[in-house]
Image (tube, helix red, strand yellow):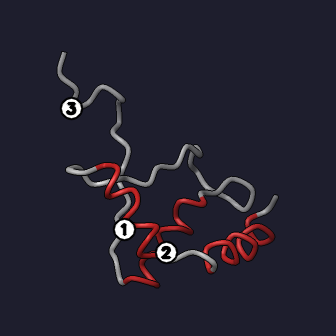
Amino acid sequence: MARAEYEPLYQAILARLDPRQVIEDPRRLADPHEPVLLCWERPPFSETVWCHRRMVAAWLERELGLIVPEVELSPKPTDGVRN
């Protein structure tokens, strides 16, 4: 499904949710750590390959004034990992 078709449907689902509850439930489960929204889609994004995580992030930013930063991929999966 193309993003232009999917996004209004997904926004309607988000509109039925309480954004504070959407934040608090994962925080409670992850405590004492901060939860992270992940996307498994492989960039580059296009009209047919896109990330609904960003839609949730934009919704949380708009509804709660949160800043949901993007985390860049490491050049190699092992960067920063110690053996």
Is residue 25 found left or right of 40 in the rendered image? left
Q: Which mark is residue 80?
A: 3
How far across and down, in percent of the image, does residue 82 sit?
17, 22
In front: mark 3 or mark 1? 1
Q: Quadrant of residue 26?
A: bottom left
> Helix, strand or loop at disc 3?
loop
State the residue position of label 2.
58
Q: Quadrant of the C terminus?
A: top left
State the residue position of label 1.
68
Q: Nearer the viewer, residue 32 or 38?
A: 32
Is residue 72 found left or right of 48 in the rendered image? left
Q: Quadrant of residue 15?
A: bottom right
Neighbourhood count class around disc 3 (C-alpha, 10 Å): few under 14, some 14–19, many 20 upward: few
How far across and down, in percent of the image, does residue 40 sit?
55, 43
Q: Are marks 1 and 2 in contact (CB under 8 Å)?
A: yes
Q: CA distance from mark 3 to mark 2?
A: 29 Å
Disc 1 marks a residue whose amino acid type is: Val
